[in-house]
Image (tube, helix red, strand yellow):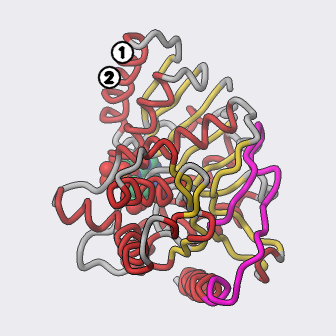
Amino acid sequence: MNKLSIVGAGLVGEAAALIIAREELCRELMLIDVQGELAQGKALDVWQAAVESGSDTRVYGGSNAEMLQDSDLVVITAGVPRKPGQSRQDVLSINLPILDTIMRDINRHAPEATVLVVSNPVDVLTYRAWSLSGQGRDRVFGQAGVLDTARMKCFIAEETGFSARDITALVLGGHGDSMVPLMRYCAVGSVPLSHFLSSQQIERIVERTRQGGGEILGLKKVGSACDAPGVAIAQMVDAIANGRNRILPAVAILEGEYGRTGIAMGVPCVLADKGIVRVIELPLDAQEQVMFDHSADQVVRDIAEMNAL
Ligand SMILES: NC(=O)c1ccc[n+]([C@@H]2O[C@H](COP(=O)([O-])OP(=O)(O)OC[C@H]3O[C@@H](n4cnc5c(N)ncnc54)[C@H](O)[C@@H]3O)[C@@H](O)[C@H]2O)c1
């Protein structure tokens, strides 16, 4: 990939930039933030770390939207994370105008760019970004499930004692509270998880995964999760930059899949060089469909609230 821009040089933007630059996933990396000097300072730091790691990715920082010019991919990490006591609505009312400004800048300076939304609430903001972009759903999508599955793999490794390398997990649906784990598709070394764990143990893992972001925020007090989100973003960037045809969960606009149209939900997708080349529709059993519908209804309500703002 020639040029990648990350808008939002906070904790998550910086963590993603570091991995992307060290792994040389693009030639030029722009770190853009309303706090221009902060972005410049972080860009220098990340560039130097990349060079030390043997990468030639050149990293620039600043606040000028013109830096977006000719980006192949724009990752949006600008906006506040949810703090204890804040509602989804509180965060949305702060992050929605931020996203709108960034989409206006992208449409002006990099209208052909693929857009990866990370800012929360990611399902609603992905829907908004796609609506404002005028692009197909293949080009505008969000990150949530790669992080949620990573969290779930940690807790499965802890509970089973097996290497996390052999664990596969799959989640659908909204990010966080309304995540839909598909435990039938979770396995250790291809052996279904139910072979090793009781339903109570599995339920504990699911609940801890749902609260994964909150658990970290509660302990850190200042600043939320950033390193694992950074790796999750880098994985999606790698799939796109290297045209890998990887199956990864992404927040995608549904066009009839899972019985829904016109909402953004976490679903397994095939990611290749321009973005999503296919949304994978898995057959759900009755219980999974109920959970999926519950999650989708929440996103529908959130989109309606957003439209009312
Ligand atoms: N989808 C996920 O899996 C996931 C995971 C972690 C965090 N997040 C979300 O990512 C977002 C960023 O989190 P963080 O911890 O990095 O926050 P942070 O507060 O550390 O950084 C946010 C940055 O955005 C910048 N910003 C604000 N308005 C801007 C604008 N108009 N243009 C450019 N930059 C702007 C701020 O100056 C700040 O540097 C939050 O909404 C958080 O909830 C999502």
Asked if residue 144 shows in the view, the reply is yes
In depth, the one of 283 and 233 nearer the eye is 283
Residue 278 part of the magenta-drawn span: yes
Asked if residue 101 shows in the view, the reply is no
Q: Residue at x 57, y 69 (%)?
A: 123
Residue 245, image x, y percentages = 76, 41
Q: Residue at x 51, y 74 (%)?
A: 179
Q: In which quarter of the image is residue 255?
A: bottom right
The disc labelled 2 sits on which kind of residue?
A: Asp
Residue indicated by mark 1:
48
Vertical placement of residue 50 versus 195, above or below: above
Q: Is mark 2 on a helix, strand or loop?
A: helix
Residue indicated by mark 2:
45
For the N terminus, the quadrant is top right
Residue 197, image x, y percentages = 43, 69
Q: Which residue is drawn at 56% across and 62% down?
A: 186
On residue 152, the disc is none
